[in-house]
Image: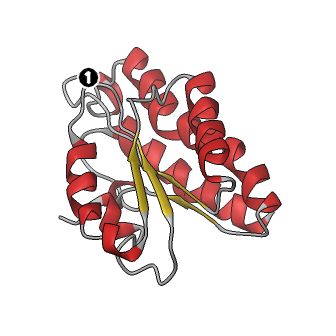
Amino acid sequence: MRSLAQLVGVRSCPVPAAVVFTKFPGTLGTRKNQEECDGCQHRRRQIRVVDPVDAMDEASIYALVEAAVKTYGALHIMCNHVGGSNPRKDLDFLRLDMDEFDRTMRLNVRSTVVGSRAALPHIIAAGGGSIINTASVDGLSANFLQIAYGTAKAAVIRMSEYIATQ
């Protein structure tokens, strides 16, 4: 499995770059990203891992984007890489816990909407860039369980197409 740093091309970027990683509270994903980026230091990259950001809190996401812009002067790439559901509650259609459905939509879809909206004005002001929204194969084809997760990732895929079109 590739790390987020590999997915967004941190090592292969031909120009000096500042990279800001955060993580969802209670996860360990940032450590792997930091290790992947350690090899980038010799290429004049600034790597900063910030405190966990609550992806389901709009103000927290906006604060992360604003801090990155304030620290580095611009934003060129936003990677919304958050998601998941509780597989004990995200079951098939008839047994799906509706509170888990709502939580999964907030975590996967709403956080991506908010992150993209927070970043886009800064990306435009910087003269262009990219928004990378990671999804899942579960958003492309149905499965027997985790209907909320698959539906949320399908929404992220479709929303990404709308953002690119508009």
Tell me, what colour scheme is on the image? secondary structure
Q: Residue 150 vs residue 154: left or right?
A: left
Quarter of the figure with the N terminus: bottom left
Q: Residue 99 vs residue 164: left or right?
A: left
Which amino acid type is shown beneath numbered disc 1?
A: Lys
Residue under the image location 69 percent in, 41 percent down? 118
Residue 116, position as x, y percentages in the image? 65, 48
Residue 7, position as x, y percentages in the image? 36, 68
Which residue is more in the foreground, 45 or 165? 45
Residue under the image location 26 percent in, 22 percent down? 89
Residue 143, position as x, y percentages in the image? 27, 51
Which residue is more in the foreground, 164 or 99? 164
Instruction: Give the image quarter of residue 101.
Output: top left
With respect to residue 138, does 63 lie above or below? above
Quarter of the figure with the C terminus: bottom right
Which residue is more in the foreground, 79 or 51? 51
Residue at image mark 1: 89
Instruction: Give the image quarter of residue 22.
Output: top left
Q: Is residue 27 visible?
A: yes
Residue under the image location 28 percent in, 44 percent down? 30
Kind of element beneath mark 1: loop
Instruction: Give the image quarter of residue 39.
Output: bottom left
With respect to residue 120, does 101 lie above or below? above
